[in-house]
Image: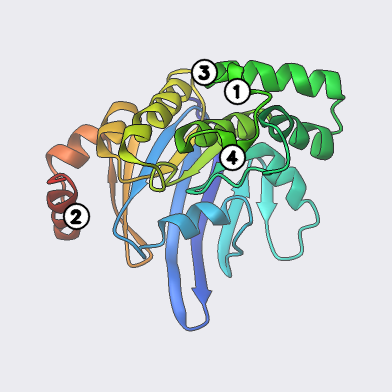
Amino acid sequence: MSAEAIIEAKAVSKWYGQFHALKDINLTVHKGERIVICGPSGSGKSTLIRCFNRLEAHQEGDITVNGIELHPKMKNVADVRSNVGMVFQHFNLFPHMTVLMNCMAGPMWVKGVSAAEARKTALRFLERVRIPEQANKFPVQLSGGQQQRVAIARSLCMQPAVMLFDEPTSALDPEMVSEVLDTMTGLARDGMTMVCVTHEMGFARAVADRMIFMDAGQIVEEGKPDSFFGNPQHARTKLFLSQILKH
């Protein structure tokens, strides 16, 4: 892990109308760091990481991603998003394109990469997520777990500085969860900077450098996995872990 900050959030707040969704969030993500964010539904986890690539706009505080400050008048949102890979609950693949073209499209359209180079990169990352044989199929022909691995490969093809995962296994059947988590674990071992919103606590224990627990739009507790799981300090964290670790 490097001292270089990839994401810096300082005193960040966000509202939806009267609802205060994020409250004075302070968080720094360093290069090579793997952070897992957990917490109950509605706690602000997904909203926070969506602010990191400007899918959501914060109203107060400062967010800097890979050296670019995010603000209402910024004109280079595409530059930020080309440096930030994001994998959602649902796969958001282009249904009319093959797997290979889904992976080639971003580098060609956003970065102006040649078709030959984009194809080479796409095949490399489809190999990386262990589904190169699916390259010429369409998304509808793949299982949910395979589609999510394509979504990961597609993000990797942009060669991002950081990968954001928003509950990437929550829409999958249980037998498909492990193949996606295995792929994510491999990325973590390779040193990819990652911020993951997930309830998969076994994965969190295995790969996280730092755990963050959110509740009611705030960061309530953070720490190394051993202390977070073994000796949580906040009553709300203890209750959450006691409930989620039952399952």
Q: Residue visible at 19% across and 55% down?
A: 240
Image: 195 above or below 40: above
Tell me which amino acid carries mark 2. Answer: Phe
Foreground residue among 246 and 11: 246
How would you rate the neighbour count of disc 3 (Cα within 10 Å): few for under 14, some for 14-19, many for 20 or more? some
Where residue 24 sits in the image (x, y, percent)? 44, 64
Q: How is the image coloured?
A: rainbow
> Quick one: SS at disc 3?
loop
Q: Nearer the viewer, mark 1 or mark 2?
A: 1
Tell me which amino acid carries mark 1. Answer: Gln
Instruction: State left or right for residue 231 relative to residue 70.
Output: left
> Quick one: SS at disc 2?
helix
Where residue 228 sits in the image (x, y, percent)? 21, 41
Residue marked by disc 2: 240
Q: Residue visible at 75% across and 37% down?
A: 106
Residue marked by disc 3: 130
Q: Earlier in the sequence, mark 4 or mark 2?
A: 4
> Quick one: SS at disc 4?
helix
> Quick one: SS at disc 1?
helix
Q: Earlier in the sequence, mark 1 or mark 4?
A: 1
Q: Nearer the viewer, mark 4 or mark 2?
A: 4
Calculate the distance from the C-alpha at mark 3 to the C-alpha at mark 2: 34 Å
Residue marked by disc 4: 140
Do the numbered discs 1 and 4 sit on residues whose CB atoms are within 8 Å? no
Find residue 135 and report its image quarter. Answer: top right
Q: Nearer the viewer, mark 3 or mark 2?
A: 3
> Residue furthest toward the front?
141
Do the numbered discs 4 and 2 sit on residues whose CB atoms are within 8 Å? no
Find residue 79 and report its image quarter. Answer: top right
Q: Nearer the viewer, mark 4 or mark 3?
A: 4
